[in-house]
Image (cartoon, rainbow, N blue to C red):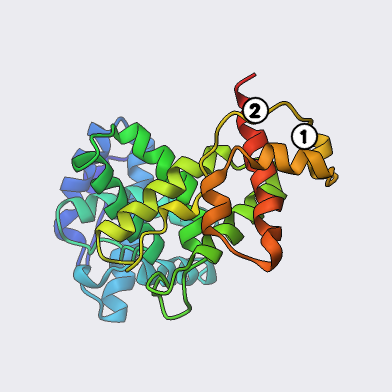
Amino acid sequence: MENPSRVRMSGPLARYGSGSVEELFRLGYTRQSTVRQVHLMAHLSRWLASEGIQVAGLTPTVADAFLTARRAAGYAGWLSSRALSPLLTYLRMVVAAPLPAVAAASPTAEMLTRYRSYLISERGLQPSSTRVYAGRVRPFLQQRERPDGQLRLAELAARDVSDFLLTIVRQRGSAKSDVTALRSVLGFLHVQGIIAKPLASAVPSVGRPQKASYGSARRGHPGAAVRLGAATPQFHGSVQTSPGRRARLIGPVVGQSAFDLSN
């Protein structure tokens, strides 16, 4: 069986041949698999030389171009990015090839990172709890993203909060699990000076409603809306729409979610 250390190699990768063989053996590759990897490496090295590209220029885009050229040359095997992965991993490990560019974090992701750090350092939450909170408020922040990569938070108003809760209620029929996290992130945004006005009070306080059926509340039963809405007094006082319609619509269902989860 062919010795992988004796595979002839020329071009910019030749100096890394023996090291790659040692690394492949260390990772548990068989002799046969290692020979195939080294032959692939030799072909890549020749192609780089023909293109005038040094190892430092072996970016993911260049690697894809090599694979395209390899297919065009009629090679039948080792034609995927997965086949090149062991070699590229080794070259990056020895700081010969560049690391792939990391995509910039979205504005929502950056804000959630700040929020989670705040919860840990200022509120004493465990990382596992901050993940739950971040997951709950992610959709709220995402809907504030602008095409220019900024978050529209400075102009955030109570109506935006109620509109978000209304969407959640319509989608899931309950918003109780989102209320605490939403109030928390609004408090964070205010403390950090990102929003000028405190909007946490725009989020309803969910208590145990008086006995009333969820179905009657959703059907608009006149008595049910009042009884269930009484569980969210803060909401009625902080969110204004045409004759309190939004408060009557969301309040019952948010309140009912407390009833659902406590029985």
Residue type at mark 2: give it: Phe
Residue, disc 1 = 214
Relative to 56, is 144 on the left or the right?
right
Residue drawn 45% across the image and 41% down it: 180
Residue 140 x/y as whole percent: 50, 57
Residue drawn 44% across the image and 56% down it: 81
Quarter in which the N terminus is drawn: top left
Q: Nearer the viewer, residue 226 or 165?
A: 226
Relative to 26, is 104 on the left or the right?
right
Relative to 22, is 176 on the left or the right?
right
Q: Is residue 199 above or below residue 233?
A: below
Alpha carbon separation for disc pair 2 and 1: 9 Å
Quarter in which the C terminus is drawn: top right
Local packing at callout 2 (Cα closer than 10 Å; few below 14, some 14-19, many 20+) is many
Which is more N-terminal, label 1 or label 2?
1
Residue, disc 2 = 259
